[in-house]
């Protein structure tokens, strides 16, 4: 548990530690990225724990401990392993791949896409659906505070470029176009 906790602490935005050390604990609830990350870790850990408990014959504590460690190491790109997750059900592999791709919070040492970019992309998608219902609405992208349009455009361009590269690599080496 100790290593898992420190891996998760390393995936949190380091500027939030300054906020916490200044005794402003209530302000931490305002940070959407921290909520997103905590929900992601909690939800993935609980789902994988339940699957391991029900399908693989682990005890409840062992399933929770092994799933928490694997989720933490995948979110933070540490690369540690306490169990061979190739023996786990394939459904759990997809959840761990999501953890690897999403990574940690912006301003941390973890790898991955970073959760703030995912929040911006999710808000843009949500706004597009809202725009269909309300064509004249002005819908800013926000995560506790509105983002500048230039930043949103940069994130969307980055995600488009990254997905294009990934598709090219997939086509070249796997040979099966999407």
Image: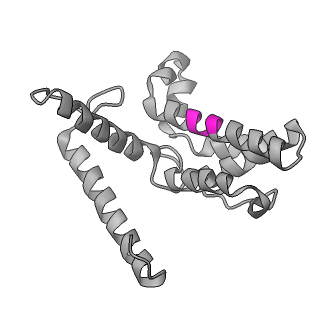
- Position of residue 153 relative to residue 77, above or below, is above
Quarter of the image with the N terminus is top right
Q: In the shown orientation, is residue 142 left or right of residue 82? A: left
Q: Residue at x 55, y 25 (%)?
A: 20
- Position of residue 174 relative to residue 17, above or below, is below
Q: In which quarter of the view is residue 151 placed?
A: top left
**Main secondary structure type of the part rendered in magenta:** helix
Residue 76 visible in this rendered orientation of the protein: no
Quarter of the image with the C terminus is bottom left
Q: Position of residue 102 (x, y in %)?
A: 50, 50
Q: Residue at x 75, y 44 (%)?
A: 51
Q: Residue at x 32, y 68 (%)?
A: 164
Which of the two residues, 133 or 4, is positioned nearer the viewer here?
A: 133
Which of the two residues, 146 or 124, is positioned nearer the viewer here?
A: 124
Find the magenta span and give its range. 38-43
**Outermost residue to the left:** 136
| Magenta span contains residue 41 | yes
């Amino acid at each position: 548990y100790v290593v898992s906790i420190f891996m998760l602490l390393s995936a949190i935005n380091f500027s939030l530690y300054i906020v916490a050390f200044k005794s402003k604990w209530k302000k931490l609830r305002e940070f959407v990225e921290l909520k997103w990350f905590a929900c992601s870790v909690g939800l993935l850990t609980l789902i994988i724990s339940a699957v391991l408990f029900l399908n693989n014959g682990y005890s409840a504590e062992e399933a929770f401990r092994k799933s928490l460690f694997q989720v933490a190491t995948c979110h933070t790109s540490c690369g540690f392993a306490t169990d061979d997750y190739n023996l786990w059900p394939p459904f759990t592999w997809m959840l761990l791949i999501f953890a690897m791709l999403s990574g940690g919070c912006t301003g941390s040492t973890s790898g991955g896409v970073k959760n703030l970019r995912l929040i911006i992309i999710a808000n843009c998608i949500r706004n597009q659906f809202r725009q269909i219902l309300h064509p004249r609405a002005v819908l800013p992208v926000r995560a506790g505070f509105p983002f500048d349009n230039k930043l949103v455009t940069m994130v969307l361009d980055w995600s488009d470029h990254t997905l294009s590269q990934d598709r090219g690599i997939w086509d070249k080496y796997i040979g099966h176009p999407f």
